[in-house]
Image (cartoon, rainbow, N blue to C red):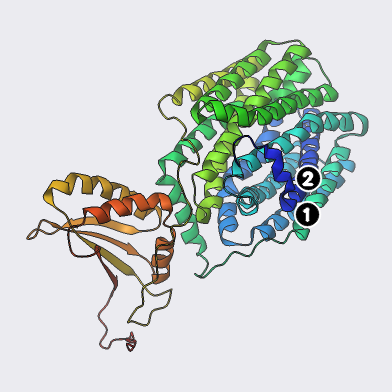
């Protein structure tokens, strides 16, 4: 989106507008349900750990199942995946409502239901996040993420207060019923949306290969690993405020369910402010400065909440915490999406969510245990200390600037015409690329090859090696394997414009005739008596 253009212009996109409005209703219901579940647990159990685990039961399945959901998002129809997730959560919410009305809930059955709702969220989120890149342009993606965050936090500013009022007036079962009804809006919107059909010339990746491809891509991408690390630390510490807030309201502020909802509303209002300020802050500061400020701001808010006995001061701290929450998480989300090509974006988002929500699930248990065996103040101050440490880590491992790389497909690769009659399942395939390198250029060649190795392995190559001819030292060969011919084609089609720089440098260093020569060979694990591969006639 051009400089100076309001992100609100995205609402002219009918599909984005329809899904955004439906998400408002769904988010409202989810926030009302969260208030009902947290407050009901304080009635069912006196254990601080059980209260904190309500939040952890929602975030734990996102940590455990996100990568599987990311594989679904990259390899199946995302609209259908989201419909299945929403239908599942609707059914679970109806069952939770009926159990609550009948008075059959125990602390562990309540955790079980919230865990199942978290499973639906885990399945839905990677497809939902990746879908933004299908609906809006790459330039508009940061604005789309900010608007989604704004929508969620608009609901966060009223949903918890409404949830507190509903629980106070009609009980937690009514809050669960509101959540069940809220799923209908997004189910209807998804049914009305006609998603673009993604062309798939190659066979769908097997599940095992898709898992390993996602893990490998992220592991071989230092920028993504930095974002995931910071997301984990932020989730680990920041969740303490939300997980322990029911205890703060009940024990420190001596408040009711309504005050709990108001406090969450303050957090939501602050988050809306953070979303609105996001564009201006990105224009004035680099990503790391914004992230570091969010860590320190949330640490200050958590420290204030540890000692405050006044609702007004606690509400002000929650305003600050909400703004820092959305600034940090939206920054992480956009950086992941703009640092990842489309073929693996669902899995990259999933792994980011695994790290962040894994931190939240761990933090919910950790800080609940500290509060139970120590004090509530000690738990909040400990979380604030971890947030300060997370800010200091940014001095050594700063966040990358998103959008600096062009990750659109390069589309230079043309599948070669083969003389042997192969299918996409034929293999294994060995590839060798021959270079002639002047001795004076060897240091530059090796530096470029180091980058080439990372790109090759990241995109699916196996057993990568660099060879030098002992009798002709100017002759170098790059060698790698892929399991099948289809994986070789997929490997080359994953090349992006950002990767082309390395290829162009290596081609420029080549001193032999023409371009570096590529040998593509199918391996023989045994020696058959007769050739079982037909040679295609030429011409």
Q: Quick check: can you spot residue 434?
A: yes
- Can you identify the residue that label 1 sits on? 189
Q: Is residue 364 above or below residue 435?
A: above
**Label 2 crowd (10 A; few <14 / some 14-19 / many >=20):** some
Q: Which mark is residue 21?
A: 2
- Tell me if 38 is positioned left or right of 504 in this view: right
Q: Quick check: can you spot residue 104?
A: no
Q: Residue at x 49, y 36 (%)?
A: 227
Mark 1 element type: helix
Horizontal and vertical percent for residue 142?
A: 60, 40
Of residues 389 and 495, the one nearer the viewer is: 495
Of residues 309 and 262, the one nearer the viewer is: 262
Check whether the beta carbons of the residues at disc 2 and disc 1 lie within 8 A of each other. yes
- Tell me if 133 is positioned left or right of 414 in this view: right
**Quick one: label 2 or label 1, which is nearer the N terminus?**
2
Horizontal and vertical percent for residue 139?
A: 57, 45
Q: Is residue 193 above or below residue 524?
A: above
Query: Which quadrant is home to the C terminus?
Result: bottom left
Mark-to-mark CA distance, 2 and 1: 9 Å
Q: Residue at x 52, y 61 (%)?
A: 207
Toward the left, the furthest residue is 471
- Tell me if 383 is positioned left or right of 251 in this view: left
Horizontal and vertical percent for residue 468?
A: 15, 56
Q: Residue at x 65, y 36 (%)?
A: 56
Q: Is residue 426 above or below residue 14?
A: below
Query: Which quadrant is home to the N terminus?
Result: top right
């Amino acid at each position: 989106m051009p400089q100076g253009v309001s992100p609100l212009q995205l609402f002219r996109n009918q599909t984005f507008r329809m899904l955004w409005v439906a998400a408002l209703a769904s988010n409202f219901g989810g926030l009302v349900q969260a208030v009902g579940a947290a407050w009901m647990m304080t009635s069912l159990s006196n254990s601080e750990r059980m209260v904190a685990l309500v939040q952890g039961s929602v975030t734990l399945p996102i940590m455990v199942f996100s990568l599987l959901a990311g594989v679904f998002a990259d390899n199946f129809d995302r609209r259908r995946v989201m419909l299945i997730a929403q239908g599942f959560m609707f059914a679970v919410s109806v069952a939770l409502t009926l159990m609550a009305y009948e008075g059959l809930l125990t602390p562990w059955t309540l955790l079980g239901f919230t865990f199942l709702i978290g499973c639906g969220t885990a399945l839905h989120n990677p497809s939902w996040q990746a879908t933004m890149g299908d609906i809006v342009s790459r330039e508009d993606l940061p604005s789309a993420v900010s608007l989604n965050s704004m929508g969620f936090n608009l609901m966060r500013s009223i949903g918890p207060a409404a949830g507190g009022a509903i629980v106070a007036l009609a009980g937690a079962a009514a809050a669960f019923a509101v959540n069940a009804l809220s799923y209908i809006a997004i189910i209807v919107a998804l049914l009305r949306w006609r998603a673009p059909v993604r062309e798939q010339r190659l066979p769908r990746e097997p599940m095992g290969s898709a898992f390993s491809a996602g893990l490998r891509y992220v592991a071989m991408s230092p920028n993504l690993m930095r974002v995931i690390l910071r997301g984990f630390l932020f989730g680990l510490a920041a969740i303490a405020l939300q997980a322990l807030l029911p205890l703060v309201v009940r024990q420190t502020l001596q408040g009711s369910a309504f005050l709990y909802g108001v406090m969450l509303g303050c957090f939501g209002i602050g988050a809306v402010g953070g979303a609105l300020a996001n564009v201006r802050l990105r224009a004035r500061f680099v990503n790391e400065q914004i992230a570091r400020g969010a860590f320190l701001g949330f640490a200050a808010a958590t420290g204030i909440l540890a000692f405050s006995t006044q609702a007004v001061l606690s509400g002000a701290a929650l305003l600050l915490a909400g703004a820092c929450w959305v600034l940090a998480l939206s920054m992480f989300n956009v950086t992941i999406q703009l640092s990842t090509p489309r073929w693996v974006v669902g899995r990259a988002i999933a792994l980011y969510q695994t790290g962040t929500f894994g931190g939240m699930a761990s933090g919910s248990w950790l800080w609940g245990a500290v509060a139970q065996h120590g004090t509530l103040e000690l738990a909040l101050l400990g979380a604030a200390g971890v947030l300060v440490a997370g800010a200091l880590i940014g001095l050594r491992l700063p966040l990358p600037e998103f959008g600096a790389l062009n990750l659109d497909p390069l589309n230079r690769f043309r599948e070669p015409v083969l003389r042997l009659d192969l299918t996409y399942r034929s293999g294994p395939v060995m590839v060798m690329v021959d270079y002639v390198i002047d001795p004076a250029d060897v240091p530059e060649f090796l530096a470029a090859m180091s980058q080439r190795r990372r790109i090759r392995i990241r995109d699916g190559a196996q057993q990568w090696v660099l060879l030098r001819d002992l009798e002709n030292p100017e002759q170098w060969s790059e060698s790698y394997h892929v399991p099948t011919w289809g994986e070789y084609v997929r490997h080359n089609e994953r090349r992006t414009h950002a990767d082309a720089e390395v290829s162009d440098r290596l081609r420029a260093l080549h001193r032999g005739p023409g371009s570096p020569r590529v040998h593509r060979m199918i391996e023989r694990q045994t020696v058959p008596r007769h050739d079982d591969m037909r040679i295609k006639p030429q011409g």
